[in-house]
């Protein structure tokens, strides 16, 4: 009479808890992916301003104009010329008022002449609240 | 004798998890790859004339900071700025600005930025003014310098 062999149990990996963690990670990444990213041009590398105050709250009316290293002007994901920017600013100013803040996101290497063009477009429109966007890095004194 | 009808065995309903896990992992990889480090940003404000506000010509009373267009990194990479036509190393300029800020925070700084100067140079100066607590900053353009765009 032959000996009865013990039943072998199938080794299984506990998948359910792993899926829970993976889902949590996905939710985290979805939530932290900023919606504002579309107004920030990826080709623009900001200059450093280590002593600047961290930006906590942004005026929802603010308009961001990106100036790429080659001087290309970009506003709301669209490449624009100086007259087009002036036109857009006029429309925005008539809607939101002339105290609407303008943020210039100039590349660190761009020549000031291109920034000057944007500044002229802003002043021609009659807007007077203008800010330069910079990155807080480096060591503080 | 009545014959018993054998009922078919019920099989357990299963959701195909393996393909879902594949998709979920792909999503996870996508988000990890596209995730960018959070960069702290700041805004450096400058004064522009408000509509209807008369422009005062009081440059004689104010300090004039001129961002030199042709300045090249010297002395261990330090840049030169011109204050009232006198050259200053950036390190010394920061000290001077801090001293000015201590004496009078309402000092108006007129920054004459040349069109060929790099933007980071202006930001560096604005940051130094901010560090010194000086907030009355005006940027003027230098019409005497011709803008020569660098081709990319």
Image: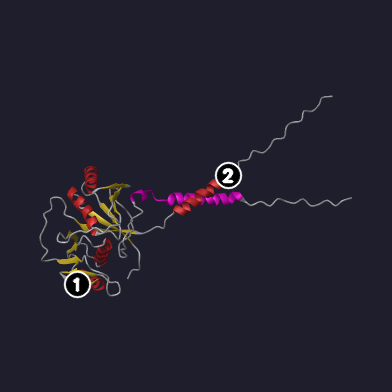
Q: Is the magenta stretch mostly helix, strand or loop?
A: helix
Relative to A99, is B142 above or below? below
Q: Which mark is residue A140?
A: none
Horizontally, residue B10 falls left or right of residue B80, namely right
Taking the magenta stretch, the answer to whether it contains residue A25 is: yes
Q: From mark 1 to mark 2, how far is it between C-alphas?
A: 68 Å
What residue span does the magenta drawing correspond to?
Answer: A15-39
Q: Is residue A96 at least partly visible in the picture?
A: no
Dot 1 alpha-carbon crowd within 10 angstroms: few under 14, some 14 to 19, many 20 or more: some
In this picture, residue A69 sits left or right of residue A33: left
**Element class at badge 1:** strand
Task: Work out which quarter of the rendered image holds the N terminus of chain B and state it.
Answer: top right
> Which quarter shows the C terminus of chain B?
bottom left
Residue positioned most to the top = B1
Q: Which chain carries label 1?
A: B
Residue A15 horizontal/vertical position (percent): 60, 50
Chain where mark 2 sits: B
Residue corresponding to mark 2: B19
- Name the residue that disc number 1 marks: B87
Q: Quadrant of residue B18?
A: top right
Q: Do the residues labelled 1 and 2 touch (CB within 8 Å)?
A: no
**x then y, percent, for residue A135:** 33, 60
Of tags 1 and 2, the one toward the viewer is 1
Seen from the viewer's position, the closer of residues A30 and A90 is A90
The reply to whether residue B53 is in sight is yes
- Under circle 2, the secondary element is helix
Q: Which residue is outermost to the right?
A: A1
Q: Residues within 10 Å of mark 2 (few under 14, many from 20)?
A: few
């Amino acid at each position: 009479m032959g000996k009865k062999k013990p039943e072998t149990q199938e080794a299984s990996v506990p998948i359910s808890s792993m899926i829970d963690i993976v889902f949590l990670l996905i939710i985290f990444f979805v939530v932290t992916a900023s919606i504002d990213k579309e107004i920030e041009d990826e080709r623009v590398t900001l200059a450093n301003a280590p002593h600047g105050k961290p930006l906590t709250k942004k005026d929802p009316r603010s308009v961001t104009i990106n100036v790429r290293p080659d001087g290309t002007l970009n506003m709301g994901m669209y490449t624009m010329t100086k007259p087009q920017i002036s036109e857009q600013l006029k429309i925005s100013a008539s809607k939101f008022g002339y105290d609407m803040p303008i943020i210039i996101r100039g590349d660190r290497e761009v020549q000031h002449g291109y920034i000057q063009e944007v500044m002229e477009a802003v002043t021609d429109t009659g807007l007077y609240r203008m800010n330069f966007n910079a990155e807080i890095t480096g060591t503080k004194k | 004798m009545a014959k018993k009808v054998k009922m078919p065995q019920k099989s357990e309903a299963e959701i195909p998890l393996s393909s879902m896990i594949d998709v979920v992992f792909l999503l996870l990889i996508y988000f990890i790859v596209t995730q960018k480090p959070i960069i702290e940003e700041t805004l450096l404000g400058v004064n522009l004339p408000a509509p209807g506000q008369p422009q005062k010509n009081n440059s004689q009373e104010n300090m004039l900071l001129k961002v030199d267009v042709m300045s090249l990194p010297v002395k261990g990479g330090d840049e030169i700025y011109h204050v009232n036509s006198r050259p200053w190393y950036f390190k010394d300029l920061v000290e001077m600005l801090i001293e000015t800020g201590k004496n009078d925070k309402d000092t108006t700084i007129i920054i004459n930025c040349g069109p060929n100067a790099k933007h980071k140079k202006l930001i560096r100066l604005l940051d130094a003014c901010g560090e010194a607590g000086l907030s009355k900053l005006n940027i003027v353009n230098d019409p005497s310098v011709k803008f020569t765009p660098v081709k990319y």
